[in-house]
Amino acid sequence: MLRQALGGAVALAGGAASAAELGRSLVVVYPELGDPFRQVFSTIIEGIEEKLGGAVTAFAMASNANPAQIVEDVRKRDAKVLIGLGRGGMRIAAALADELAVLVGCVVSVQESEARSFPVHTLAPDPALLLTRLKRLRPATRRVHLVYDPKLNAWLVKLAREAARAEGLELLAQEAADQAEALRAYSQLLASADPARDAVWLPQDPTTVDDNVVLTLVLKEGWNRNIAVFSSHLGHVKRGALFSLYPDNHELGRSLAASALRLASNPKSGAAGVLPLRQARAAINIRTAAHLGLDIASVQSGFDLVYPSS
């Protein structure tokens, strides 16, 4: 079943007329999950509403919901724009892409073929933000190693090459089709990496970054050889990665609302494709930073989360 949440479509007080109009004709669809995911979606929707100046129609999809019925319920709302959050929201967006303006947010990983009809805002941090922070922490870094599944992250590597050039870095990206191939690639690059010049980047890639075998190997060897390992996944910082970026959910909501406004006024303005996360906060592991010889007092002030916390 489809459960309405977080208020209904109401006339907006204040804000630009275009925002008020959009608020009355915008629907947000997201999966009904327990915390902390429920709170994530709630905060994103709060950001959307703040940007538009009032409440929007938001529906939480139960796990047993019938997608066809959800599509019909959205049609009955006479929506002009749909924001789908998470994988569940993306399925509804795909079903309605030929009928109204749609965009998707809060998706961890997606194949480019799934984003041919509408923009998909992923939770993969923008490579430019990651590499800028890496150079700030370790200015001597010259090369960044990345192992990735081309079916999931070819789009990200394109952006990463541009960002690396801008930072004076060489990106050494290796493709891997499965975990065994990824393990071989990591083992070889860690054995030959220069601790003074090289860093390893762990992307959001379920094929190449298994949280047990691969992550354990990379963090252990990185620690033993004093190689900086940074990640696109917040949880890896708790495990020992040097730093990561993670979503600022409220700002992500505001950004999605801004994209929806552009789509509403000009449907061709929202080019289809996969987009990185730019509304990000930063986390650092100060134990790892100290092990790598970084000045803790000078670096931790620029981060929103610090591990270990005590």
Image (tube, rainbow, N blue to C red):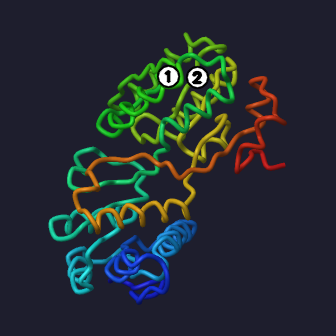
Percent x, y of residue 296:
81, 34
Quick one: 198 or 193, which is closer to the camera?
A: 198
Q: Position of residue 304 (x, y in %)?
A: 70, 50
Q: Determine the residue positioned at 43% across, 76% down.
A: 16
Give the x, y percent position of residue 279: 53, 53
In the image, farthest residue toward the left: 98
Residue in the foreground of this view, choosing between 221 and 205:
205
Image quarter in which the N terminus is found: bottom left
140 is higher (above) or lower (below) than 50: above
Q: CA distance from mark 1 to mark 2?
A: 6 Å
> Do the residues under discs 1 and 2 have CB atoms within 8 angstroms?
yes
Classify mark 2: residues with Cα within 10 Å, few (<14), some (14-19) or many (20+). many
Q: Residue at x 35, y 68 (%)?
A: 83
Give the residue at mark 1.
145
Label 1: how many Cα within 10 Å (few below 14, some 14–19, many 20+):
many
Quarter where residue 191 is shown: top right
When the figure is inspected, residue 151 is found, relative to residue 235, above or below; the finding is: above
Q: Determine which of the numbered discs, if any, sits on residue 199 in the image.
A: 2
Seen in the image, is 225 located left or right of residue 178? Answer: right
State which quadrant residue 258 falls in.
bottom left
- N-term-proximal mark, 1 vs 2: 1
The single residue placed furthest to the front in the displayed view is 16
Front residue (pair 59, 51): 51
**Nearer-the-camera pick, 156 or 150:** 156
SS at mark 1?
A: strand
Classify 25 as above or below 163: below
- Which numbered dot is residue 211? none
Give the amino acid type for the residue marked by disc 1 in the picture. His
Q: Residue 72's spot in the image, x, y percent?
A: 20, 81
